[in-house]
Image (cartoon, rainbow, N blue to C red):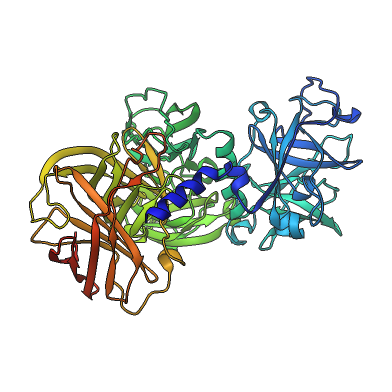
């Protein structure tokens, strides 16, 4: 274990930046070697041409002695996306030598100036073999033009169902001296591409946009009147959000949505706020009296809850700022539901949102569908965009009538694609960035107050039980076990002096993919191998929060600091490695008659990792680790080692050092949930799985 920790510490210290560390990315970084060509030199502060999208950019790329015209789109203040062929020639080719980007240009004047492409980025699938599904390039500018021109959000839809019937627009440049050209229509969808019929010869890199303004793809090739657009895939968006944005601004704060519209009744919405690890964010605005903010976490990742009181008067709204990012929360006026007609559909945002409206007296929308056979009575419309791809439920309840609900994709009632429908509850996989139309109506023509609750669920059972760590800062760990929606967490770390620190937390993992609980601290318990001594409860060690982004990635936060975690793979194949027919259960073990000492056990393949939470001779918490191959499926023996001098949460990283070896520990399993442990000094105890 000592060798593993030291090797990982050295590896982490030698890693380059996030951009360069991705093995699937190729980059070229340089300063301009010459001023831009004469055709690009004008920097007149002229107004934009009518109909011009200011976030769509004109690009001139210098490949050898040839200047190539391309299009692209700003997706961040200093980042544009274009075609891969616009930054690199493809298989066995080269990067562009000089690169100039001009937002909203009309071909002669550039209202927002121009910037040099100081960093060009392409995927190895493009540079190595010209894979058309990776004909996508990133351009990092030498200054933030997007602050003036604005920028669009890149997104994707899983599969092709979400593209059926969508009225797309595509915008770009077709000639070196011309302004932008825009067309619109439907798109044919394939696994990696969208194809449209076009009358114009668009330069590569032109963006295709859905009605909500999000960018789904950029153009690559044209043949026979058809333009092929390379769709953004998961790799593209993951690299953009997790690596590229963070490398430019590690503490950049992002808010899940910037607009939520709720009905006149009481409502609640939870909004995800993300910034870099260890960075702080805050809500800068004092809310009005009718809006309450709860559960705010101000480090790294948080999900503040906004609760609205029932509105008894006219429509009202509040604009809050979260680290300068605007969030508008609007509430409808009291009385008849304002969203009873499709034309006045309410907009919802967030992974968890509830809203109440009153449909009494609204009458039925003649354009409305009939979810689950609900063909009469008043109803209400909402449009909700999924922030995350995960299991999603929508529940509608009413004390006045039996409601039905339908979830659809599409831009208008006459062209809806059914996703799910049912009486009171529907479940479906919500896809990040996809806009869903939700319609609720009474089964038998009923009307009145109705409550809609949308939850992007992350059931506790899906969170992986076992060891978690930060691979960039080895030496600490969390052992997390879930049982249904309950969690038991042990935090193996160091205090500010470098001494051992372990604390436990027990509670419920909420459906909002979020765990929060108090940390319990104990002392004066038994030493490893010593006679049993019951520990004493010291007190509250503060609050710990665990926010899961996937089943194997999370952010752990206290009131003052945070750390990003992922599942620890200590054997070939990691947590999913093949195992023998018999395997000890992964989780917390203990001796019920001797509470206060815990054993965290995980088996991956034929490797086992054992963490023992016990106490030092002075009564302070201490923990030891043992790891190695199992002699057979029922027997494990290794040397337990304790480490000291490691990094406390929130401090600069420092690798721990091993103390004197604690001694040999043997575990003999009689079945998957019972075992006998032989501790240093010869003491033998029976342990079993801890049920909580």
Q: In the image, is 318 to the left or to the right of 540?
A: right
Q: Position of residue 689 (x, y in %)?
A: 20, 65
Query: Which residue is depicted at the point 63% across and 45% down?
Result: 20
Q: Position of residue 649 (x, y in %)?
A: 35, 38
Whether 522 is drawn above or below 466: the answer is above
Quadrant containing the N terminus is bottom left
Query: Which residue is depicted at the point 51% across and 51% down?
Result: 437
Residue situated in front as seen by the camera: 2 or 342: 2
Q: Is residue 378 visible?
A: no
Residue situated in front as seen by the camera: 321 or 644: 644
In which image quadrant can residue 543 be found?
top left
In which image quadrant can residue 487 be found?
bottom left
Q: Position of residue 14 (x, y in %)?
A: 55, 44
In which image quadrant can residue 249 be found?
top right
Quadrant containing the C terminus is bottom left
Q: In the image, is 189 to the left or to the right of 631?
A: right
Outermost residue, front direction? 660
Query: Which residue is depicted at the point 19% across and 71% down?
Result: 674
Whether 154 is drawn above or below 102: the answer is below
Outermost residue, bottom direction? 581
Q: Position of residue 526 (x, y in %)?
A: 12, 52
Query: Which residue is depicted at the point 46% across and 51% down?
Result: 8
Q: In the image, is 66 to the left or to the right of 128?
A: right
Q: In the image, is 125 to the left or to the right of 549?
A: right
Whether 187 is drawn above or below 121: the answer is below
Residue situated in front as seen by the camera: 156 or 470: 470
Circle count:
0
Q: Is residue 28 visible?
A: yes
């Amino acid at each position: 274990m000592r060798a593993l920790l030291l090797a990982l510490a050295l590896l982490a210290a030698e890693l380059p930046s996030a951009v360069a560390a991705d093995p699937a990315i190729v980059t070229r970084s340089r300063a301009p070697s010459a001023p831009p060509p004469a055709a690009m030199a004008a920097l007149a502060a002229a107004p934009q041409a009518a109909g011009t999208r200011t976030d769509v950019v004109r690009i001139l790329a210098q490949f050898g002695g040839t200047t190539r015209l391309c299009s692209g789109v700003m997706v961040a203040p200093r980042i544009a996306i274009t075609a891969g062929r616009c930054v690199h020639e493809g298989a066995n080719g080269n990067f562009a030598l000089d690169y100039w980007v001009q937002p909203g240009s009309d071909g002669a004047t550039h209202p927002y100036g121009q910037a040099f492409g100081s960093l060009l980025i392409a995927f190895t699938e493009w540079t190595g073999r010209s894979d058309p599904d990776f004909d996508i390039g990133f351009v990092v500018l030498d200054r933030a033009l997007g602050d003036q021109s604005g920028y669009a959000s890149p997104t994707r839809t899983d599969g092709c169902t979400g593209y059926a019937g969508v009225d797309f627009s595509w915008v770009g440049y077709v000639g070196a001296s011309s302004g932008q050209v825009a067309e619109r229509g439907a798109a044919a969808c394939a696994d990696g591409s969208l194809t449209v019929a076009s009358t114009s010869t668009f330069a590569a890199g032109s963006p295709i946009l859905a009605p909500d303004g999000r960018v789904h793809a950029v153009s690559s090739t044209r043949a026979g009147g058809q333009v092929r657009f390379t769709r953004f895939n998961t790799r593209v968006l993951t690299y953009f959000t997790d690596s590229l944005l963070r490398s430019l601004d590690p503490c950049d704060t992002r808010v899940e949505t910037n607009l939520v519209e709720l009905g006149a009744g009481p409502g609640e919405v939870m909004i995800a706020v993300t910034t870099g690890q260890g960075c702080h964010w805050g809500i800068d605005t004092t809310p009005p009296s009718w809006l309450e903010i709860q559960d705010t976490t101000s480090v790294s990742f948080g999900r503040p809850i906004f609760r609205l009181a029932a509105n008894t008067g006219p429509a009202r709204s509040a604009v809050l700022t979260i680290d300068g990012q605007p969030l508008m929360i609007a509430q409808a006026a009291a009385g008849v539901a304002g969203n009873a007609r499709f034309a006045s559909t309410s907009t919802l945002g967030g992974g968890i949102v509830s809203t109440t409206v009153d449909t009494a007296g609204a009458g039925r929308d003649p354009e409305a569908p009939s979810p689950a056979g609900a063909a009469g009575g008043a109803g209400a419309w909402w449009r909700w965009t999924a922030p995350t791809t995960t299991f999603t439920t929508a529940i509608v309840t009413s004390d006045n009538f039996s409601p039905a609900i339908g979830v659809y994709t599409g831009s208008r009632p006459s062209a809806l694609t059914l996703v799910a429908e049912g009486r009171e509850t529907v479940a479906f996989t919500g896809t990040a960035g996809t806009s869903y139309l939700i319609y609720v109506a009474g089964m038998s023509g009923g009307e009145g107050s109705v409550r809609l609750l949308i939850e992007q669920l992350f059931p506790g059972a899906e969170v992986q039980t076992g060891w978690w760590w930060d691979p960039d800062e080895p030496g600490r760990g969390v052992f997390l076990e879930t049982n249904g929606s309950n969690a038991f967490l042990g935090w193996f770390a160091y205090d500010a002096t470098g001494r051992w620190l372990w604390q436990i937390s027990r509670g419920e993992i909420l459906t909002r993919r979020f765990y929060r609980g108090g940390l319990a601290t104990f002392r004066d318990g038994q030493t490893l191998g010593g006679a049993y001594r019951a520990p004493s409860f010291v007190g509250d060690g503060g609050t710990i929060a665990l926010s899961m982004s996937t089943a194997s990635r999370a952010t752990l936060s206290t009131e003052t600091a945070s750390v990003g975690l992922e599942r620890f793979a200590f054997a070939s194949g990691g947590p999913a490695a093949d195992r023998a027919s018999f395997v000890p259960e992964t989780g917390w073990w203990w001796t019920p008659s001797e509470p206060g000492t815990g054993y965290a056990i995980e088996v991956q393949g034929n490797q086992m990792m054992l963490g023992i939470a016990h106490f030092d001779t002075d009564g302070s918490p201490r923990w030891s680790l043992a790891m190695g191959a199992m002699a057979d499926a029922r027997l494990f023996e290794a040397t337990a080692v304790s480490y000291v001098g490691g990094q406390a949460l929130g401090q600069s990283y420092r690798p721990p050092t091993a103390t004197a070896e604690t001694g040999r520990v043997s575990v003999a399993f009689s079945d998957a949930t019972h075992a006998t442990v032989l501790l240093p000094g010869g003491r033998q105890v029976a342990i079993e799985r801890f049920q909580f």
